[in-house]
Amino acid sequence: MLFLAICCSCQHQVPNISIQGIVTAGPGIKVVLQEIDTREVLSVDSVHANAKGYFFFKHHLKEAGFFRLILPNQKNVLLVILPGDLIRLTTDTISGFRSSTNIQGSDESEWLLEFMTHADKNRFRVDSIEQLIIDHRDSSDFAELTMASISSFQSILDDQLKLEKEFLATHSSALASLIVINFGFGPKPVLTMEDHLPLFLRLDSALAISYPKNKHLIYHHKRIIAFQDRLLVKNK
C-alpha cells in the first residue's frame, strides 16, 4: 500500500504555472490554451470566461516552452512560459486587439507581443496593397500601379527584415527569438538559413547558454546540422 501511495504521488504533477486574464467584452467566451511543440500544436486546456470576462489556467511545465491562447474572432496571443511563471493578461478581441493587449509576468512574452504588433502592421500594409491592385485590375493605370506596388512591397519587406534582425540582436538569449527567426511573412520566412546562416548559428550559441537542453533549442540545432549536411553534399 505504501509503494502504491508513493507511485500515485509521483505521477501527480503539481501545477507550476498559471495564466489569468480578462477579455473585455468577452463574458462567457471560450479560451483555449495550446502548446506549440517542435513539430505539432498540442491542446492543453480550455475554459469559459466568467461574466466579467475573467479566465484562469493552471498547468504543469517541465521546461520553458511556447504557448498560444486562442480567443474569439480569430485572435490569438503567443506566450513564452517558464516553470514558475504567473502570467496576467488583459485584451479586447473586438477592437484594437494588439494595442489593447497587456501582458505581465513574462518579459519574453511582452517582447514577442511588441514584435507581433509591428509585424501585424506590416501584414496589413501588404494586404491593403494587394487589395488595391485587385480593385484596379481593369483600370488604365494598372501597369503603373503594379510597378509602384512592387516598390512598396520591397519597402515593407525591408522593414520586416530590420524588425527581425533588431529583435535578434537585442534578445539574442531569449527563447522567443526562435519564434522570430522562423516567423512566416508571406510565402516563406524573411530570415532563412540559405541567406542568413550566421544569424541562426549565433542564436544557437546564445541559447545553448541561456536554455541548455531545451527541446526547442535542440530542434533548432538539429535543423542547422541537417542544413549544413545538405550544403556539404551539394558542394561536393
Image (cartoon, rainbow, N blue to C red):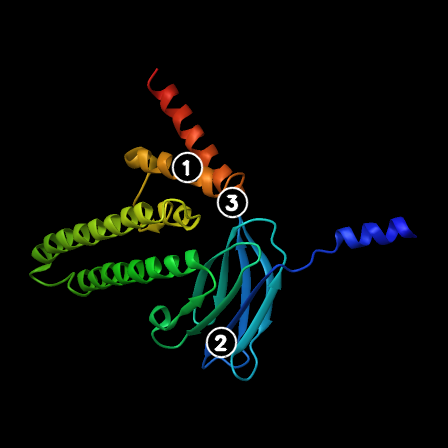
Give residue 16's quadrant in the image.
bottom right
Residues under labels 3 and 1: Cα distance? 15 Å
In the visual, does 141 lie left or right of 228?
Answer: left
Q: Earlier in the sequence, mark 3 or mark 2?
A: 2
Residue closest to the eye, 89 or 184 = 89
In the visual, does 183 lie left or right of 25?
Answer: left
Give residue 192's quadrant in the image.
top left
Type of amino acid under label 3: Thr
* Mark 1 lies on residue: 204
User: In the rendering, which numbered label is found on residue 214?
Assistant: none
Looking at the image, is 28 positioned above or below residue 214?
below
Looking at the image, is 6 positioned above or below residue 127?
above
Q: Earlier in the sequence, mark 3 or mark 1?
A: 3
Looking at the image, is 105 positioned above or below residue 63?
below
User: In the rendering, which numbered label is found on residue 38?
Assistant: 3
In percent of the image, x 39 and y 70: which residue is there?
A: 101
- Residue 211 locus on image (x, y percent): 49, 43
Looking at the image, is 197 positioned above or below residue 58?
above
Type of amino acid under label 2: Ile
* Mark 2 lies on residue: 22
